[in-house]
Image (cartoon, rainbow, N blue to C red):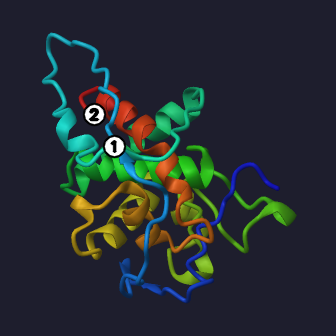
Amino acid sequence: MNTMLRKSVLGIAGLAFAGGLAAGPMNHSTTAGPAVEAAPVAVAAQADKPAVDTGKLIPHGVQGEQSTISLDSEQTGNVAAIIAATKKAGLDERAAVISIGTALQESKLENLGHLGDRNDHDSQGLFQQRPSSGWGTVEQITDAEYSTLAFLKGLKQVDGWQDMPLTEAAQTVQVSAYPDAYAQWEQFAADLVAEHWNS
């Protein structure tokens, strides 16, 4: 099986994304396991930068086993781009955690083009968004700022997203064939936001 599990499949559930706004959240349930207390987020002390409020990052703890990967300079640059787009959208650190956790699951923070036979339909970019489902053109959805803003527009349509576990909020926007897979990235995404939010 493709290790990237790139299943951002808006088309599978028929969720339309018109004019940058999700048509509406799907009914869903989370079975990722009980929430567990989040490990403390390590925040490097920076004399000229305010500390990140780590309580905002994972307000209800994480669910299930957590995963991490080593990031190269491109992936780290994409973390910075997601955070910048989140700030541009006027959203807080929690939205950045959800966005980065989603991109970790969808692409491992790599801005993927079309992968031929390994592609999930026409899914591309950090969030594996599909041009055929109305997310934008290939050029748009492979632009980190555009794709993040498109994801965040969908997230803002989800009632109560701020208080949802990452996997539930992400799944409502993405409509993945693997709805619980996002949960494993919550702690790592929070660590990345804590490290880069004030960079």
Q: Label 2, on which residue?
A: 197
Amino acid type of the residue that numbered disc 2 sits on in the rendered structure: Trp
Answer yes or no: do the residues labelled 1 and 2 have beta carbons within 8 Å?
yes
Classify residue 179 as left or right of residue 55: right
Q: Which mark is residue 83?
A: 1
In percent of width and height, residue 121 lies at: 73, 74
Q: Name the image quarter holding the C terminus.
A: top left
Tell me if 3 is positioned left or right of 188 in this view. Answer: right
Q: Quadrant of residue 26?
A: bottom left
For residue 143, say whether it is visible.
no
How crowded pointer 2 is (Cα within 10 Å; few <14, some 14-19, many 20+) is rated as many
Of 18 and 138, which appears nearest the observer?
Answer: 18
Q: Residue at x 16, y 20 (%)?
A: 49
Q: Amino acid at mark 1?
A: Ile
- Which quarter of the rendered picture does the N terminus lie within? bottom right
Q: Secondary structure at mark 2?
A: loop
Quarter of the rendering containing residue 54: top left
Instruction: Using residue 70 as the reference point, say whether residue 88 is left or right of it.
Output: left
> Residue, x 23% and y 75% (percent of image)?
159
**What is the distance, in whole Å, between disc 1 and disc 2 at their CAs?**
6 Å
Q: Earlier in the sequence, mark 1 or mark 2?
A: 1
Q: Residue 67, labelled with which disc?
A: none
